[in-house]
């Protein structure tokens, strides 16, 4: 049964769907208005009617809904990248995670959902406006207990040590690879999002030099399908390139890795994405 302050998705169609907290007030749209209080006491899957008699179905929001309807002040990571991050980084309940470049809190929302109830996401963001916007988003989704805001810029190292994952989302990703190494547990992963090939290349080589192996680079593309009777086809537009993801795994005794060296102690670190 839906209660006061629960998060719901009111769904009419792909264009008219609204993520909101159940509280007072009205939701207005081109089908009339809905008294939000009328949702209390209903179950997910029920519907509520506008004053003009149009039905809106009450759905339980997914993480995808929460990410895509977040209030943005920055470019966000999309669910297509976030999904890969969650499985490649092995995020679990109780994990301690650092993200640098918190932005609007899109990735934060997904990470916090997976580390709760006993884990923690430490978000570093130097811009106070971005951090405040992220805070409001995280509060809206009821995730503040497993989130800690750090309104500061990092150069040498993070405050937290022995963490399970580090995500880097800043312009000079390679600068924070050594800091990530210092904070990670052995065998755990770092990731970065790189919009350009220059950033990607420099970040990968810095990972190699710092003490990361099993380095993977990839681009995630998603194409949705329009299903219509007698005319099913792919959508004409799609969210394509938003950045390349890079993942690396920390080893406890760094070895200088040089893919060109004949007598390298370890094979090339790349698991994919760049030639060895």
Image: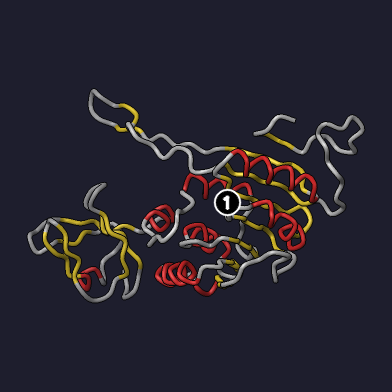
Q: Quadrant of residue 146?
A: bottom right
Q: Describe the element under mark 1 as helix, strand or loop.
A: helix
What is the basis of the colouring in this image? secondary structure
Residue that badge 1 annotates:
86
Residue 76 lies, in percent from the top left, at 46, 54
Residue 81 lies, in percent from the top left, at 52, 46
Mark 1, Cα crowd under 10 Å, few <14 / some 14-19 / many 20+, is some
Q: Quadrant of residue 3?
A: bottom left
Q: Residue at x 60, y 38 (%)?
A: 197
- The quarter of the picture where the N terminus appears is bottom left
Q: Residue at x 63, y 62 (%)?
A: 97
Q: Is residue 153 above or below residue 106?
A: below
Residue 5 lies, in percent from the top left, at 34, 74
Q: Is residue 200 above or below residue 273?
A: below
Horizontal side of residue 54 vs 230, given as left or right: left
Please state which of residues 61 and 220 is positioned toward the viewer in this rendering. Answer: 220
Q: Quadrant of residue 45?
A: bottom left
Q: Residue at x 74, y 67 (%)?
A: 161
Q: Residue at x 47, y 66 (%)?
A: 130
- Residue sitting farthest toward the left: 52
Horizontal side of residue 183 vs 112, given as left or right: right
């Amino acid at each position: 049964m839906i209660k006061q302050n629960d998060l719901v998705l009111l769904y009419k169609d792909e264009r008219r769907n609204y993520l909101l907290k159940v509280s007072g007030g009205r939701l207005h749209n081109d089908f009339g208005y809905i008294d939000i209080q009328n949702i209390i006491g209903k179950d997910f899957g029920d519907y509520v009617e506008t004053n003009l008699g149009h039905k809106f179905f009450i759905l339980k929001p997914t993480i995808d809904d929460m990410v895509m309807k977040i209030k943005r002040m920055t470019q966000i990571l999309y669910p297509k990248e976030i999904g890969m991050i969650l499985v490649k980084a092995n995020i679990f309940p109780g994990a301690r995670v650092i993200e640098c470049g918190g932005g609007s809190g899109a990735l934060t929302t997904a990470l916090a959902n997976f580390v709760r109830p006993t884990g923690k996401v430490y978000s570093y963001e130097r811009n106070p406006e971005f951090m405040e916007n992220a805070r409001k988003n995280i509060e809206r989704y009821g995730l503040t207990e497993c989130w800690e805001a750090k309104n500061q810029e990092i150069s040498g190292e993070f405050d937290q040590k022995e963490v399970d994952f580090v995500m880097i989302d800043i312009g000079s990703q390679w600068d924070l690879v050594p800091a990530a190494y210092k904070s990670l547990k052995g065998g755990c992963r770092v990731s970065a999002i790189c919009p350009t090939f220059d950033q990607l290349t420099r970040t990968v080589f810095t990972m190699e030099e710092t003490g990361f192996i099993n380095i993977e680079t990839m681009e995630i593309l998603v194409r949705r399908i329009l299903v219509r009777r007698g005319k099913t086809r792919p959508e004409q537009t799609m969210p394509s390139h938003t950045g390349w993801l890079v993942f690396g795994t920390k080893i406890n005794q760094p070895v200088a890795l040089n893919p060109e060296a004949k007598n390298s102690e370890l094979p090339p670190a790349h698991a994919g994405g760049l030639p060895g």
